[in-house]
Amino acid sequence: MLNHHLHREAIRTGEFPQLDAPPILAQPLDHRLFPGSCLAPLSHAIASLDRRSHQGGNQVIIRFNNGYGAIISEYRLLQGIYEIAPLRFHGPGPDDHEFYFRSHVPDLTWCSDREEILSVCGQISRLVPRGTI
């Protein structure tokens, strides 16, 4: 799992890090990962899932029951890598969200396999809902 904060300079200069990652996923995001076995362990926490095409790739927006969510996009520069960012929803629609950067969950995480995606989404699904503390 790569944390965006650790590689800001590489992103700015266009010099991307070499990844010691598991084998590249051969199938596109929505065929290999969603909504099937990848997120099955979190199915109790998922309120909705919205799949869409985005900048020539696939994107999934997940809303969890706690009012937070995740946006998962195919990373266009490295095949088999996915970007995950936490969201906070403020309305009922799939686009009624904003990026949420005020938690322990990294602002942007690059993942290359299901376990990493599940780990980040699990962290987001366990965030304390607004107004409960």
Image (spheres, rainbow, N blue to C red):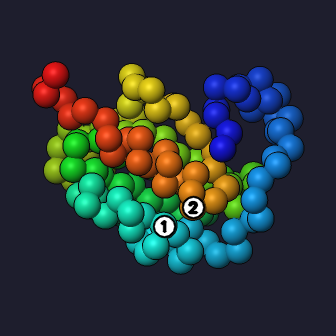
Residue 41 pos. (x, y %): 38, 63
Query: Which residue is at a point 77% across and 65% down the rendered structure image?
Result: 23
For residue 132, say whether it is visible.
yes
For residue 79, say whether it is visible.
no
* Picture quadrant where residue 44 is located: bottom left
Q: CA distance from mark 1 to mark 2?
A: 6 Å
* Picture quadrant where residue 9 is located: top right
Residue type beneath disc 1: Cys
Residue 25 pos. (x, y %): 69, 68
Mark 1, residue position: 38
Say left or right for 3 vs 130: right
Residue 79 pos. (x, y %): 74, 61
Say left or right for 46 vs 10: left
Query: Which residue is at a point 68% across and 39% down the rendered structure image?
Result: 2
Q: Tell me which label, 1 or 2, sits earlier in the chain.
A: 1
| Depicted 11 relative to depicted 125: above or below | above
Viewer-proximal residue among 10 and 118:
118
Mark 2, residue position: 114
**Tag 1–tag 2 contact (CB < 8 Å):** yes
